[in-house]
Each structure stands twice: as C-alpha cells, then as structure tokens.
Image (cartoon, grey):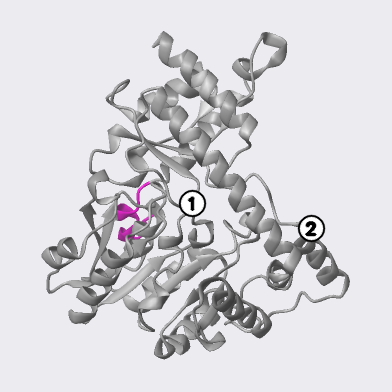
Amino acid sequence: MKLAGRLEHIEPFYVMECAKTAADIARGPLCDPAQGGRRMIYLNIGEPDLGAPPAVQAAAKACIDAGLTQYTPALGLLALRQSLSAWYDERFGLDISPERIVITAGASAALQLACLALFERGDEVLMPDPCYPCNRHFVAAADATAVLLPCGPEQRFQPSAAQVTAAWTAKTRGVLLASPSNPTGTSIEPEVLRAIVEAVRAKGGVTLVDEIYLGLSYDPRFEHGALALGPDVISVNSFSKYFGMTGWRLGWMVLPPDLVAPIEKLSQNLFICPSSLAQHAALACFEPASLQEYERRRQALRERRDYVVPALQALGLHVPVVPDGAFYAWMDVSRFSDNSWDFAFELMHKAQLALTPGRDFGRADAPRWMRLSFASSMDDLEETIARLSQFLRQA
C-alpha cells in the first residue's frame, strides 16, 4: 500500500515504545513476586497519579443519567467557555473573552487545528530543542517543517529572541513554544517571552504557546503565561494535567478573534465536537471544592519535586535547571552512560524502573539526557531513588 509522504517526516513516539517494553518486562519473571521479582515503577509517562476529583466524576455520572450525551457546538459548551474565562480572571488576572476560547478534543486536537489553519507546505516553524515530540509532528502533519533551535541549560532549555531573529527566513511562519516545557519543566522568563513575541510580531509571524502545564507552576514569576502579551498570541491548554482528566481527552485554546471562525470550520469537519460527557463533567472542575483539591495536588507535586531533584543530584544525576512547573526532572546521565536510550533499557531490566530517554525530545545532545516524571507517589519516588542508588553503585 502506498503511504502519504508526510509519514516519512513523523518519527515513532519513542516514549510509547519504551512503555511497551516496560509493560512486557512487568508481565515477566523480573516482576513476578513468586520468582523473586519486584514491581515495575513507571516514571516515564506524563500522567498525574490522581485522576479527576469526586465532583468531576459525579458530574459525569449525572450527565449520563440525564442523557446529556448529544453533540455540542464545535466550539464547545458556552458554559464551559465562560467557566474558563472566569478562571483566567480569578487565577491569572487575565480578561479573556469566552468568545476567544475554543474547547477541543484534548490539547493535541487544539495543536492540530492551529497547525492546519496556520501552516502549509513550504512553511517553517521555529521550535526549541528539546521539546515535546508530538508538537513537531503536528507541524509535519500540516506539511510544514519544524526548525529546531538548540537550547541548553544556560538558557533554561528555552529559546531566546536573538535565536528566533537569527533563524528567521523568508519561509518562517512563526514559533511554537512550550512554557512550562515537556521534558524540562522549565518556563520561559517573562522578559524573554515578551521579546520573542515582539520579534515574531515584527516579522508578521504567529506565536503559538503550549501552556498545558501552566496551572502546575511553582514560581509566581511564571504564573501569568503568554496571554498577557496581546490578543494575537495563541495559547493551547488542557484539562489533562492540572485538572487531572488525562483520559477524558479535553482541551482548549485561546485565539485571536479573527481566527475563531476558521478554527470552528476545521473543527466541525475534523472532530464534529469534543466529547459531550467530558465537557459536562469539566464544568465541575471549577467548583470551589475541586479548585481546592487541585491546589492541594499542586503543592504535593511541588513537595515531590523538592524531594526528588536534590536526591538525583546527590546520586550524580545532574538536573542543571530545577523545574519551575509541570512534573519532570530533565537529568544528565552522561556520568554513567553515553547513550540514555541504552541506559533506559538497562534500568528497566536491572532496576525495574521505567524512565524516558532523551531521544524523543530533540537532536541536540539527546543521548545525554533522560526525563523522570515525579507525578507518581512519594513512596514510588523514594523507592526509585533507592533502586537508582543500588543500580549506580553496581554499574
């Protein structure tokens, strides 16, 4: 069967390839208690260990009982768009009109819609290296080309306005950023982000910012995000991370007013609408009890970060930039291995630990880096450090 040429530009999602191996090992003798094995600890997938809070689960059940499962408008439930508008005001002090908010089938659908609406064959989109691999592939799926800007720890693994300006060509259409970032958990300094937006604006380009971890920020400097920089900035967000609704596949984006109708047209044709059940349930995310629970969880994640990062440093697994958001530690494993891909498979087989090698996230020195997700319980993190300590002593 002849396949579309664009598939040649989309690499496998190596995070999931590693996850398959971890699952295979978990079913085998190395993890069988009857054969002296121990359970696999999964710190490889970016998924909080706590799901949707009780009010959200109850709202989903009530939605089914009431038969509220029909199609919704392609832009999403107006009540949910209004709730998000109020949340932006109360949490971030931002005046975001509900008319600019589009509900989507996860942040992935939002990124796909934005890329299809804005980019086409021959366009180039500037992105940081490292970055979340699927963001590059959304650009490729629109037949455009992602141009990666190497970003080291000295710049928080985030691009600068000078890099953007230097890399800009006649083919450049805009930038796709992430703050806080997956895999590094680092945000773009506010003055740097402002300079990037102004540089892109001066070129007549578009600034698209993945902000799915914005709610999980641990430093007040980074809590206001990109939307304060003007209505031409596009922000993509999700109910998966801060709101704990990973499998519900619900996200949203904030658009310039003139882009809402084109995105609506695309969404109508490609997705019809986001899940009605997920949308009705998500309304309960903004109830006071839910918001209190989310803030409790954010504090718990901060405590996990404050435990695991110094513990990794003490083992010689250097984390050069302490993550200020999300739930990832981006660590340098070069003291112990010259290839983090091989190192990850060693950890799965010998320590029953599933972590993510740097291969997925870019090309700049990727074999040096590995991502650890601290979205699991403190018990898992403490056991992980103990196993890492034992493994590294024997290496």
**Residue linked to disc 1:** 326
Q: Start and end of the magenta stretch?
A: 1-11
Determine whether 16 is above or below 235 in the image.
Answer: above
Q: Residue at x 29, y 46 (%)?
A: 362
- Judged from the image, the secondary structure of the residue bearing numbered disc 1 is loop
Q: Are marks 2 and 1 in contact (CB under 8 Å)?
A: no
Q: Nearer the viewer, residue 76 or 208?
A: 208
Tell me where residue 289 appears, x and y as whole percent: 75, 63
Q: Can you give x and y, in whole percent of width and height, for residue 363 in the image?
A: 25, 44
The 10 Å Cα crowd at callout 2, few under 14, some 14 to 19, many 20 or more, is some
Q: Which amino acid type corresponds to the residue marked 1 in the rendered image? A: Ala
Residue at image coords 71%, 73% = 283
Return the residue found at the far front.
Answer: 220
Label 1 crowd bin: few (<14), some (14–19), many (20+), radius 10 Å: many
Q: Position of residue 45 (x, y in %)?
A: 53, 42
Residue 247 can be seen in this image = no
Q: Quadrant of the C terminus?
A: top left
Magenta segment includes 310 = no
